[in-house]
Image (cartoon, helix red, strand yellow):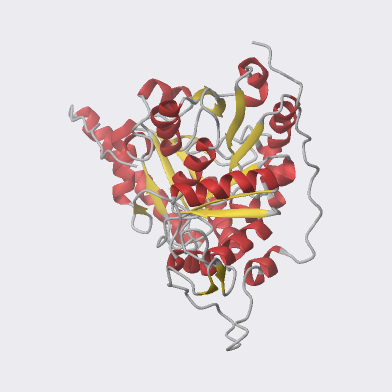
Amino acid sequence: MTAHTDHPIATPPRAPSPIHGFGTLAVHAGSPHDPATGAVIEAISLSTTFAQTAVGKPVGEFEYSRSSNPNRNNFETMVAALEHAKYALAFSSGSAATTVILQSLAAGSHVISVSDVYGGTHRYFTQVAKAHGVKVTFTPEIEVDIREHITESTKLVWIETPSNPTLRLVDIRAVASQAHEHGIMVVVDNTFMSPYIQNPLDYGADIVVHSVTKYINGHSDVVMGVAAFNSDDLHKRLSFLQNALGAVPSAFDSWLAHRGAKTLHLRAREATTNATAVAHALEASPHVIAVNYPGLDSHPHRAIAKKQHRNGMGGGMLSFRIRGGHAAAERFCQLTKIFTLAESLGGVESLCEVPSSMTHAGIPRDQREAVGVFDDLVRISCGVEDAEDLKKDVLQALERAVAEAEGKVGNGIDRTNGVNGY
């Protein structure tokens, strides 16, 4: 179906470089000294309500903490600076940020999404969005066939780059340019890269979203989400929904996430160093079928990584297919000694999991496998431990897991039932 072209959106040019470097912004943006005490670190503002000098005239800019809170505002200011955005809005989770963006669309709207998305996003798109009249079309090659899927009702394109868990990359500028010709907004989930490695707004995206739970907070102790953008109209619409739906983070969580983000650049660099070492070790192993890591020259989208990622960095996430099937994948995650078998990612500690039975278990098998999420796929989040220790841990677990799986296959033992969760 031919799309309308009456109201194209101008693709924003690459933003100018900020005056200060990333590390300086991470430490200082949204971090004013307390004017009364001189405290260098902000206090946690737990008050739910704020005094007014007269009816409708609060003492400062705050009235009620669901609407706005000092800690949340400071965190939002920091994220906006790191993502080269005019605005940022924080939410109680990454899924809540997704919900608010989709809720901003009118009933009857159409969304185009990459196929290999986070399981929770897929669940929302397929089971929740349709309840309020939003239809989602999935495509594995969005740069190639986006025009084929655009209709009169298409309002939004949703990208994950890298994708979860296969680490496929999308050329943001190429997709944004095509979408904007038809007046369609582009949202990029930047969770896997973090603002340190990639800034989607610089490449034409309209909104960038993060699960703050992951790299921005970085310490596995906060569940939060955030969206950043430059449009005044988007700010009006999304801030209204942020308040109306009430999916906001607490003051304490905002404070913790802000503190965590101050070391994001240090953690992202170390995680990339570690993931690169592990990826090279896996790629050289006879027990591995394939490695998905955008920092490897063998990655099919390496050219995009060199263009979109800071210094061509691959980030701290990777996945690989292990020989021996699901049994070997599950056993590998049980045999690691430093990597912890757990969901989530982006923390200081290294984690591993089996997406087909854990984070992506809710996606039908045929749909999973169509985008490379096979039962033998293992996803790894490299933390900030020593690279040599992580490499040794992966190799010893790999050796034992494959040997055990081969032995069990020979004995007719089938271990294909894993845990089921997100």
Which residue is depicted at the point 63% across and 62% down?
77
Side of 246 relative to 226 (left or right): left
Which residue is depicted at the point 50% across and 46% down?
97
| Quarter where residue 142 is shown | top right
**Up-down: is 17 above or below 369?**
below
How many tags in the picture? 0
| Residue 192 can be seen in this image | no
Query: Seen from this angle, which residue lies furthest front?
Result: 55
State the image coordinates of residue 172 (x, y, percent, origin top left).
Answer: 68, 36
| Quarter where residue 152 is shown | top right
State the image coordinates of residue 84 (x, y, percent, origin top left).
Answer: 71, 54
Query: Seen from this angle, which residue lies furthest top?
Result: 1
State the image coordinates of residue 388 (x, y, percent, origin top left).
Answer: 49, 60
Query: Seen from this angle, which residue lies furthest bottom?
Result: 37
Task: State the quadrant of the N terminus.
Answer: top right
Nearest to the observer: residue 257 or residue 410: 257
Side of 33 relative to 174 (left or right): left
Side of 112 relative to 256 (left or right): right
State the image coordinates of residue 181 (x, y, percent, origin top left).
Answer: 75, 26
Nearest to the observer: residue 226 or residue 244: 244
**Up-down: is 338 above or below 325?**
below
Nearest to the observer: residue 107 or residue 186: 107
Task: State the quadrant of the C terminus.
Answer: top left
| Residue 135 can be seen in this image | yes
Side of 80 relative to 17 (left or right): left
**Up-down: is 34 above or below 228?**
below
